[in-house]
Image (cartoon, helix red, strand yellow):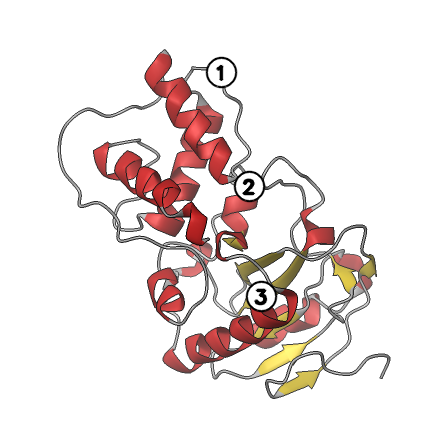
Amino acid sequence: MSFSADSTCLCDIVEAVNFNERRAPVDILLLHYTGMEDGSKAQEWLCVPESQVSCHYIIHEDGRIVQMVAEDKRAWHAGAGSWQGREDVNSRSIGIEIVNPGHEFNYPDFPEAQIAAVIELCGDIIARHEIAPRNVLAHSDVAPGRKRDPGEKFPWKRLHKAGIGHWVEPAPLAGGRFLTLGDGGPPVEALQEMLSLYGYGIDRSGEFDHQTWQVVAAFQRHFRPEKVDGVADVSTVETLYRLHQTLEKA
């Protein structure tokens, strides 16, 4: 065994092979789902060279935690993406894969034992690395054009109640003005500016293009999961505004 467990949580160790040296200090905790039908096969895939992927931890449906890469190493879990204007998310992050087949396989709810383990492990990692609440992220937050995980069923509100991540109560769904594909002008530019300032990688073009639609949908999956459609309605914009208003605490 080439490393010892970093966490005080009860962990098994199964060593992955796809990792290298970090190029930046850790300031992000990134949560994924595995997106495969079987958890044991997902773990095996994370351990073989040809997959070109790995993670620091995987959490199974029964709450079992397995560490696969030492936290001081750069696991290959995030792929291309950015947060707060910086790329190479792998160097900055600790990655947790949560066993769930995902949207391609009927996307079941996350079991209670699994979420309890997620909360325990996240709390331990955040405390040791002093990760800011706004930097506890979904894979879809840093790669909105490619990823949907861990998805709109993931209980971000519950994690926040346990002291993990940034959250505000989403504004209720309502009618009124909205922004969508094909719109443009100062209101779209203001929306893009707010998303960018929060951390999302988005061009401030003033045009509601496909990239903007993807980022809005990613934002909704995390912060307004009741309706994920990529349309910047009043509820979405108000929720984003509320998050900005509480940033000094995040």
Q: CA distance from mark 3 to mark 2?
A: 16 Å
Of the numbered discs in the image, which one, if any, rests on residue 3? Answer: none
Please give the residue where the numbered disc 2 appears in the rendered image: 146
Rendered view: 157 above or below 116: above
Q: In the image, residue 42 lies at what x, y percent? A: 61, 68
Q: In the image, residue 240 lies at what x, y percent? A: 34, 39
Q: Mark 3 or 2 closer to N-term?
A: 3
| Any part of residue 250 in sight | yes
Which residue is depicted at the point 49% across and 34% down? Answer: 197
- What SS does tag 1 mark? loop
Number of residues whose C-alpha sits closer than 10 Å to that of mark 3, classed few (under 14), some (14–19) or many (20 or more): many
Which residue is depicted at the point 25% across and 50% down? Answer: 226
Q: CA distance from mark 1 to mark 2?
A: 21 Å
Q: Mark 1 or 3 closer to N-term?
A: 3
Nearer mark to the viewer, of 1 and 2: 1
Please give the residue where the numbered disc 3 appears in the rendered image: 97
* Residue 42 shown left or right of residue 193 in the figure: right
Amino acid on which disc 3 is placed: Glu
Please give the residue where the numbered disc 1 appears in the rendered image: 205
Q: Quadrant of the N terminus?
A: bottom right
Which residue is depicted at the point 54% across and 59% down? Answer: 32
Q: In the image, residue 89 lies at what x, y percent? A: 67, 48
Amino acid on which disc 1 is placed: Ser
Quarter residue 157 falls in: bottom left
Amino acid on which disc 2 is placed: Arg
Q: Which residue is most to the front? A: 248
Task: Tally the numbered discs.
Answer: 3
